[in-house]
Image: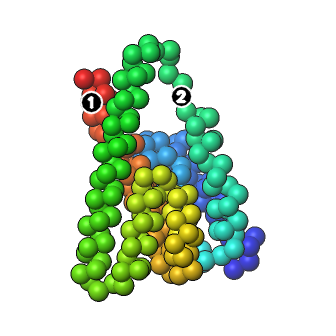
Amino acid sequence: AAPAAVVGVVGTAAAAALALESRTTLGRRLTSPLLSFFLGLTLRSLRILPPMHPVYDSLASRLLPAALPLMVLSAQIRPQRSVSQDRRDLSLMLLTFSVCSFASCGGALAAFLLGCELDVPQGVVSRVCGCLTATYIGGSANLAEVALDSGLSNEGGILACLAAADVLLMCFYFAGLKLEIFHGQCERLVSS
């Protein structure tokens, strides 16, 4: 497919996601990044978008790194709070991060053992588990870095599947966080 056509379809999907976010309740809850991801998956499944294209690499290397700073800049600033409230929130965040990091490592160990039982080569299983642990503890950029350092990036099919699975799982995770039920439960947990 021509690069201009792929850029046009991807841009239209992003614009549609923004429109859905601003005009529908479901769109506001899911947010445009999740909607654009699901639209992209749908367009790929319908074979409107190709599975691989140089445009995707260009978008991932140029636009994706700007997403986090833009998200942080658009975050709502809370009114000034006391130092004790901030310390409590930071302590809770550190505790949550630590528990989740240990859980990610435990999950990676369980996946490694399961992979070995399924006769997947240990070298592949250990590199895949390392990449997934790195991404869940430190973010998607760590997936690419660990894949590069471990040599998994030379096995494009495995890395592409890992990256897609990582993004899909994070979409479900963030969609769950955006739901009002989760939001209310988290607020009650933090305020108690």
Q: How crowded is mark 2: few (under 14 residues within 10 Å), some or many (20 or more)?
A: few
- Mark 1 nearby-residue class (10 Å; few <14, some 14–19, many ≥20): few
x and y percentages locating residue 179 in the rendered image: 35, 42
Picture coordinates of residue 49 (x, y %)?
59, 74
Q: Distance between the residues labelled 2 and 1?
A: 21 Å
Is residue 111 left or right of 24 when viewed as pictured?
Answer: left
Front disc: 2 or 1: 1
Q: Residue at x 67, y 61 (%)?
A: 61
- State which tag comes first along the sequence, 2 or 1: 2
Residue 117: image x %, image y %?
Answer: 24, 81
Quadrant where the C terminus lies? top left
SS under mark 2: loop
Q: Residue at x 36, y 85 (%)?
A: 121
Residue shown at 44% from the left, 15% from the top: 83
Residue topped by disc 2:
76
Q: What residue type is labelled 1?
A: Leu
- Disc number at residue 151? none
* Residue 161 vs residue 143, the one in the foreground: 143
Which quadrant, please, contains the N terminus? Answer: bottom right
Judging by the rendered image, the residue that carries numbered circle 1 is 189
Image location (x, y in percent) of residue 75: 55, 33
Residue type at tag 2 = Gln
Q: For this view, does 86 lie left or right of residue 40?
A: left
Circle 1: element type: helix
Q: Do the residues labelled 2 and 1 touch (CB within 8 Å)?
A: no
